[in-house]
Image (cartoon, grey):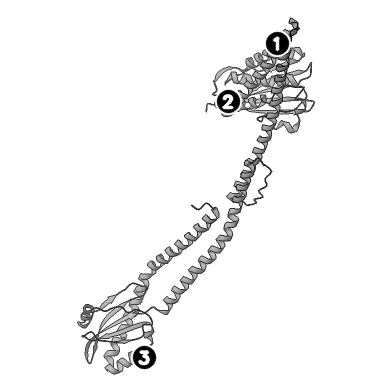
């Protein structure tokens, strides 16, 4: 089996050219053969009638001498038969094989009939005419030889086909190199990417389908590079987040083995172990949640409920966090009923509000507003916290990305909360975006359809 695309392209072209040449030859022969034969029959009949008149006009000897000197004998071969089958020929065959005359044909012409046959070949005709001479009736058979023009055309066509095949083969050999080269580059690039090397430059400038494929490949390679970097960041972040509670659990568990601990210390150590275990459990739940949302295997359970009431309940549930830091809320919540999966949306409001509380300054203010139009509802959640760097604003909703890495030790989190938010909003056919300036706070804007379409 031929595996090389280059060889396949060349062989396909050669087979196509050869098959096309053969088919074209036979088709053209089939189209023009009948016309050439008809034309040859007319010319041969006119020449034969001229010869018949010569033998009628001149004595036999003079007629034979006259006919033997005719220039038309370069294109015609004449045989004059006696009734016994003996014949006298005029003209040279020059390698041409004469058509055999049967006794039936001979007898028919002697009796005054006419014989006309078209043997195989182009412009090949056999004509039998009765020839009346002073010695009695004879049978004259005239036969066309290959005319010089037809021979020239045939030779020219053959040479043209051979030259066309050779020139076309050379051109396709050169052209196929340029055709296959981008594919070879893509193949090598694929192998390098599979090995983990994303620094691949294709430099394919073509505007054809191959150029489009190369640009799509480069886009995919860039996405894979970003995904790999996010995966590494995620592993690093999760490793840190997991290592910290594990270290605490291990250290305090070892401390509990001490026999001289007071009941108060023992209780405090157990509380720390329980808190760290809950932290790990929450991280595990977030990972599972994100995995389910990204696989889109989780179905929405739609219900029509009051969106403003749901947000109020989330704020109340988070009261221990914001009241401990003297953070206040300013609410401008228009009464809106939305058809959606409100359990899922609670996760959205919880994650965004928890982030706003986490990154706000003590005594800060968080503004929450709802604005409704004909088809959509827009929820704005603004804080006056530390803000998000501009280069991170485009990536904070990506999987495995943890924004504000310089504060990763001060502010707990694995960087999955906003990725979960993005997935839930997308499942509701909505949109989420962020506006932020460093030191000036952050605003999350969530737009949802009033009625979520069912896929």
Relative vertical location of residue 351 with respect to residue 134 in this rendering, above or below: above
Question: Which is more toward the observer, 371 or 414?
Answer: 414
Q: Is mark 2 on a helix, strand or loop?
A: helix
Which residue is at the far front?
Answer: 259
Q: Is mark 1 on a helix, strand or loop?
A: helix
What mark, if any, has residue 292 been given in the picture?
2
Q: What element carries label 3?
A: loop
What mark, if any, has residue 69 been given in the picture?
3
Is residue 316 among the parts visible in the rendering?
yes
Q: Are marks 2 and 3 in contact (CB under 8 Å)?
A: no
Q: Do the residues labelled 1 and 3 touch (CB within 8 Å)?
A: no
Mark 1 or 2: in front is 1
- Image x and y of residue 159, in percent: 49, 71
Residue at image point 36% right, 90% down: 69
- Image x and y of residue 375, in percent: 59, 26
Mark 2 or 3: in front is 2
N-term-proximal mark, 2 vs 3: 3
- In the picture provided, is 325 more to the left or to the right than 148? right
N-term-proximal mark, 1 vs 3: 3
Q: Do the residues labelled 1 and 2 touch (CB within 8 Å)?
A: no
Relative vertical location of residue 230 with respect to residue 52 in this rendering, above or below: above
Q: CA separation, marks 1 and 3?
A: 133 Å
Residue that label 1 marks: 270
What is the quadrant of residue 316 in the picture? top right
């Amino acid at each position: 089996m031929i595996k090389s695309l280059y060889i396949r392209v060349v062989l396909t072209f050669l087979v196509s050219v050869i098959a096309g040449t053969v088919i074209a030859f036979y088709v053209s022969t089939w189209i023009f053969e009948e016309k050439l034969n008809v034309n040859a029959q007319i010319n041969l009949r006119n020449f034969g009638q001229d010869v018949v008149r010569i033998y009628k006009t001149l004595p036999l000897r003079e007629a034979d001498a006259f006919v033997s000197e005719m220039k038309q004998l370069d294109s015609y071969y004449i045989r004059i038969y006696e009734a016994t089958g003996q014949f006298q020929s005029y003209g040279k065959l020059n390698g041409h094989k004469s058509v055999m005359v049967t006794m039936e044909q001979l007898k028919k012409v002697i009796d005054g009939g006419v014989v006309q046959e078209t043997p195989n070949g182009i412009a090949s005709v056999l004509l039998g005419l009765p020839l009346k001479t002073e010695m009695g009736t004879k049978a004259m058979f005239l036969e066309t030889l290959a005319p010089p023009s037809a021979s020239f055309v045939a030779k020219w066509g053959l040479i043209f086909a051979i030259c066309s095949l050779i020139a076309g083969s050379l051109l396709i050999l050169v052209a196929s190199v340029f055709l296959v080269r981008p594919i070879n580059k893509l193949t090598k690039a694929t192998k390098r990417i599979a090995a983990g090397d994303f620094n691949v430059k294709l430099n394919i400038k073509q505007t054809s389908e191959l150029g489009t494929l190369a640009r799509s490949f480069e886009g995919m390679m860039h996405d894979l590079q970003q995904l790999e970097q996010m995966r590494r960041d995620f592993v690093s972040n999760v490793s840190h987040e997991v290592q910290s509670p594990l270290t605490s659990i291990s250290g305090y568990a070892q401390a509990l083995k001490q026999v001289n601990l007071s009941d108060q210390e023992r209780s405090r150590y157990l509380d720390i172990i329980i808190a760290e275990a809950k932290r790990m459990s929450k991280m595990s739940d977030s990972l599972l949640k994100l995995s389910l949302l990204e696989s889109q295997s989780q179905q929405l359970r739609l219900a029509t409920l009051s969106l403003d009431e749901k947000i109020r309940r989330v704020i109340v549930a988070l009261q221990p966090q914001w009241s401990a830091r003297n953070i206040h809320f300013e609410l401008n919540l228009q009464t809106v009923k939305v058809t959606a999966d409100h359990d899922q949306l609670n996760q959205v409001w919880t994650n965004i509000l928890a982030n706003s509380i986490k990154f706000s300054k003590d005594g800060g203010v968080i503004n929450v507003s709802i604005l409704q139009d004909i088809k959509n509802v827009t929820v704005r959640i603004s804080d006056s916290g530390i803000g998000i760097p501009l280069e991170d604003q485009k990536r904070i909703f990506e999987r495995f990305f943890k924004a504000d890495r310089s504060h990763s030790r001060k502010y707990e989190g694995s960087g999955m909360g906003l990725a979960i938010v993005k997935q839930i909003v997308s499942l509701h056919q909505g949109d989420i975006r962020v506006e932020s300036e460093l030191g000036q706070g952050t605003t999350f804007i969530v737009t949802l359809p009033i009625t979520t379409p069912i896929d």
